[in-house]
Amino acid sequence: MVEMVIDENNIGYIPSLGTSFQLNETAKEIILMLKQGKSKDEIVEELAKKYNKDWREVFIDVTDFMEKLKIYGVIQ
Amino acid sequence: MEYQKPTINKVDFRLASKYGSPLKEQRIKGEIDGVPVKELVEKFGSPLFVFSQRELEEKYREYKTAFSSRYPNVQFWWSYKTNYLDAICKIFHKLGSKAEVVSEFEYQKARRLGVEGRDIIFNGPYKPKHILRQALQEGAMIHIDHFYEINDIEDVARELGLKEVGVAIRCNMNTGVYPQWSRFGFNIENGEAYEAVKRLYKGGILKLVGLHAHIGTFMLSSSAYRVEVEKLMRLKNWSENQFGVEVEYIDIGGGFASRNRLKGVYQPPEVIVPSPDEYAEAVTGAIYDNYQGKLPKLYLETGRALVDEAGYLLTSVFATKRLPDGKKGYVVDAGVNLLYTAFWYNFELFLDKRYEGLNEPSQVNGPLCMNIDVIAENVMLPPLERGTIMTIWPVGAYNYPQSMQFIQYRPRVVLIDTNGTPHLSREADDLNYVVEKEVVPDYLK
Ligand SMILES: Cc1ncc(COP(=O)(O)O)c(C=O)c1O
């Protein structure tokens, strides 16, 4: 994962790419968890527990989000 | 805190503007004429065509007033092809529109709805003799498309023992707008229309009572109508002088634009679509400037402009996916088999409520399992849930009559009356309906 700095307005900045991203709350949480080295399954489980959601739905959202991170070059 | 679907969007400073962020703007429509879209879908199913009688009546009055306030003798003829759902035709007939049809089927549909033959204008390039016979017997007004049709009408009139038959001819012309609809009727510029009038009188049975043209559809230029009327009036004056008759009416056809977004046109409809007053000014001004003798009656076959904005298609999100190019893909339950005009127009997409999260470039696809089944190729949408109801608008013109049973059954159609009560106006297709006319040859049984 490339280095991303997230400010208080949920704008993420990638110094090495010089690009900025706008994130929402959940997106920020996922990126922080990725930074901590958590796996996709752990992230899904944690979010589902925290928000009391069906994990199968969270799984779709997280998969989708990570696909987009790959397209942006944030993760491999 | 509530769960939000995670979103991330690259910040593109070109997208930032004083008009608000395209990442946050959501177009929302929770109800139609006071009826929540959610309730409509729960009661009648999804997808669902919805028509608003209020909007129909309003548009009709707007156009009627624009023309009648400028001109003494105005008659609207409802263009059946634009939308021939019985309930829609009924509303227009109640409002005072007569019927404009272009085929045997449309003629029969109008008759079935109780429209008298004399209240029908029969246009179109294909009128086989048997339906011409019925139309002439019942007193319909035939607008002649070609020289063969003159022969046919004369033959049928003789068979029926008619001594004199009043007819109109369809004309086509250059009004400075492209594409030019030059396939229908007789051309003005090369003199063919004048030849056609001469030919009518040479036969000794037919009499010219009207002149008709339809210069195209979604006409964004009101001045094209000025040119059209000038050319028709010139032909009218010439015919009257030449044959000592009175041409009772000119029929300017349809073609007024609705507030839809033509693909490739980037200004918003509010900016480029002429108002009813602008159209009316162009048409009536040109009659006043060019008439001799009596003022002719003015006939209009306005279709699209009266019905397009009264029609909605409700559709529900069935699934989402991430497309390989990064776009969000939505699978919805309404396909292009219901939205023939999707190939020319970028519709508005409204959401049923506000959704958390930032907009991202999205594509909305129908359920057809065909690559062409794209409702919206590039729209900014927030993360939507399964079951989100989208309202596609305006879809009242040409979509319902051109919708086809293809892969999916066609849905129900609902009409909301002026009190805000929805009424079922067409049942959905089902297997029996679809296979009703099929025959399995004996040897395959
Ligand atoms: C002869 C004729 N009249 C009227 C119309 C209705 O046109 P619009 O829906 O553009 O008003 C058409 C449409 O093709 C037409 O061919």
Image (cartoon, coloured by chain):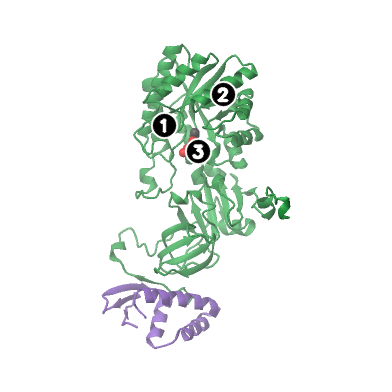
Label 3, secondary structure: give it. loop
Establish if B318 lies above or below B76.
Answer: below
Disc 3: which chain?
Answer: B
Q: Which dot, 1 or 3, sits closer to the camera?
A: 3
What's the amino acid at mark 2? Asp
Q: Is mark 3 within 8 Å of ligand 1?
A: yes
Establish if B22 lies above or below B291.
Answer: below
Q: Pointer 2: what residue?
A: B152
Are both tags, 2 and 3, on one chain? yes
Rendered image: mark on residue B280: 1
Establish if B30 lies above or below B279.
Answer: below
How packed mark 1 is, by other alpha carbons closer than 10 Å (few <14, some 14-19, many 20 or more), is: many
Percent of width and height locating residue B159? 64, 19
Q: Pointer 3: what residue?
A: B303
The residues bearing labels 1 and 3 have C-alpha atoms spaced at a distance of 15 Å
Question: Do the CB atoms of the residues marked 2 and 1 lie less than 8 Å apart?
Answer: no
Instruction: Indicate the chain coloured green by its letter.
Output: B
Residue at the image point whose x is 57% and y is 34% from the top: B103
Q: Is residue B111 left or right of residue B28?
A: right
Of residue B364 and residue B12, the one placed in the foreground of this image is B364
Instruction: Indicate the chain coloured purple by its letter.
Output: A
The residues bearing labels 2 and 1 have C-alpha atoms spaced at a distance of 36 Å
Image quarter of residue A23: bottom left
Q: Is mark 1 within 8 Å of ligand 1?
A: no
Q: Earlier in the sequence, mark 2 or mark 1?
A: 2
Percent of width and height locating residue B145? 49, 28
Can residue B331 be seen by looking at this rendering? yes
Q: Which dot, 2 or 3, sits closer to the camera?
A: 2
Residue at the image point whose x is 50% and y is 19% from the top: B209
